[in-house]
Amino acid sequence: MSTTTLSSTLSSSASVRLNRNTSYQSTRVADSITSVHSFISRWDPQTSVSSSFLRATTHLHSYLLHVARSASRSAHHELVRTNFILQSAMSRLDQELKNHLMSITDAHSTPEAISTIRSIVETMISTGYGEECLSTYQSIRRSAITSQLTELGFDLYTYLPKNLRKLKWDKLEIMIKSWIDAAPVAFRSIFSDERQLSDRIFGSSPESVRNAVFESIVGNTATKLLSFPESVAIHVKRSPEKLFRLLDVYDALSEVLPDIKSVFESLPASEVQQKAISSLTKLSDAVQGTLSDMEKEILKNRVKPRVAAPGGALLPLTRYMMNYLISLSDYVHSLNAIESNMTPDPTKYNFSLLGPSNNLHDSPASIRIARLLLVLTQKLESKAESYGDNSLSYLFLTNNVNYMINKVETSRLNNILGEEWVVAHMSKVRRYVEGHLRSGWASVYAALPVKEKEAVERIQRFEAIFQKVLKERDGWVVVDAAMREEIRLLVEAMVVPPYSSWYRAYQGNATVRFSPHDVAKQIEILYEGLNSGSSSGSGSAKLLRRFGHYLGRKGTHSSVRYQIENKEAQSSKLSVQYQTRYDAEHHGELSFRYQIKRGNSVQYI
């Protein structure tokens, strides 16, 4: 509602109320004129306006209306004289209004100050000066609000969309932080207090008028404040690193939405509420678009290096994505709202979607995160093909997927993805370990002598192949210390026991250079060297329990039986049995069998 229309509405309602008594005594009119002249001539900006002066100006206005209905010449002269006096009085009164408005901060100012301003406003409106009154009131209160926002770091001019397009990201990020700090204070304190102030000062006016006065002061500023998130969502170039700032803005705006509803609840068609909904929608679109772009970027074909990562180590993408998703998990409740395609409506907003949930792994956010991890796994499997050695490919997958599991288990992602995700990917790691053992070490076992007459020739072949394997694996990496120990134990179980059986029978042969201890030591040295320098493990015991069994460090006796179907070391079935006994007094007794079968399946018995 414009100032002119609003003031006319106020004046007409006041005029009807004041014009009922049309009987005027000349003595009363003279007294009123004298009172007005006295106040104007002795006006002091430091003193409060008197109630007698306000009554006098109100009476003069009623007299002016009475004289205006007369057609006599004397009435015309009296009309001009009274109107001039009334204008002088209103000029002083307008200045009084400015002084008092500038002396208060908000609705929590002293009751006396609020009461004085209300009296001045009612007098000016009732005497036909509503437009001037509202112009002064709006100008000062808008300036006060702008000043408060500036103190919070929010400059309305700087935050205009046309200015945002020119800013670099580092400066825009600073503005985003300022907005996040300013928005809650604005809607919960500044605008809310302004609403109370308008209601107290214009309390005698109809509710529609009070709403219009408040919106005329706050509406434009609030709309500009809410335009900033929309501008950020539209104009900021999408990238994974900028997603968190979008979510920060979304969180901040979602949190103040109830306050927006509360402050502007009597304005159902308020542009402020519409702008809040529009900004949330644009932010949701930007977040979903960024996540979709991220999926495409992960799978995007680029110029590939010769190998995915030297020695089968962690792919930088794996480390980046897991740390990224851990950070993203802090926004799980906002993601749930966004991924649910929920359009926030202040009149029927479902705030439960933003609260804690005990079933996060069934939520839309968990589906989005699980999909990103699936895309990452597919990328890893594609990268694994860049290695020319199958055993190294499996080791690469073991390192990276095991790293993913560790990150999930030690972060909030565990609650989001659920135990089923962890179990499924542990199964994948077991298959990768199996593939690494089968493709990388079965040839070493196959070189062992199996018949007495082949002893000399086969032992020479074994030594050559064993040394070749050790040399080829130099520079390979097993990131997790627990995983490194687990693979070493499995390799030793494949090679050392059968070699020991053969060695006991042929150790007198001059061609035998390696003792079982030598073989075991070389394997140990090899796997001690397969260290990336940054272990993410938490101890072999934890990992082995995760794999469904436990290997003791002391008092261990191992027996191994291998079945090889062809002479080229392509094993079709590998059965490994561990029997472990501890001191019964301290540890009890534990035995188990670990079987690896062809077809990448693992069975525990």
Image (cartoon, grey):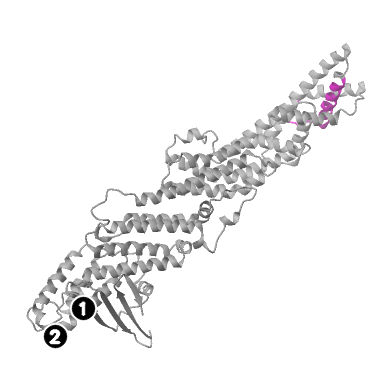
Q: Residues within 10 Å of mark 2 (few under 14, many from 20)?
A: few
- Residue occupying image coordinates x 55% and y 61%: 357
Q: In this view, does 206 lie to the left or right of 369?
A: right
Quadrant, the N terminus: top right
Q: Please, is residue 431 above or below residue 376 in the view?
A: below
Residue 48 visible, this orientation: no
Q: In this view, does 85 lie to the left or right of 30?
A: left
Q: In this view, does 37 lie to the left or right of 472?
A: right
Give residue 526's quadrant in the image.
Answer: bottom left
Give residue 585's quadrant in the image.
Answer: bottom left
Q: Please, is residue 490 above or below residue 182 in the view?
A: below
- Residue occupying image coordinates x 75% and y 26%: 129
Residue 138 visible, this orientation: yes
Q: Mark 1 points at which residue?
A: 496
Which of the pair 238/263 is nearer the observer?
A: 238
Q: Does the magenta stretch include residue 589?
A: no
Q: Position of residue 387 (x, y in %)?
A: 24, 59
- Amino acid carrying label 1: it is Val
Q: In this view, does 130 lie to the left or right of 369?
A: right
Q: Position of residue 94 (x, y in %)?
A: 73, 27
Q: Where is residue 151 in the image (x, y as percent from the top left)?
A: 56, 39
Q: Which of marks 2 and 1 is nearer the N terminus?
A: 1
Q: Position of residue 329 (x, y in %)?
A: 47, 57
Disc number at residue 505? 2
- Residue occupying image coordinates x 62% and y 38%: 271
- Residue occupying image coordinates x 27% and y 57%: 309
Which of the pair 342/398 is nearer the observer?
A: 342
Give the structural element (helix, strand or loop) at label 2.
helix
- Amino acid carrying label 2: it is Ala
Which of the pair 554/491 is nearer the observer?
A: 491
* Magenta residues, start to end: 43-66
Q: Is the magenta stretch mostly helix, strand or loop?
A: helix
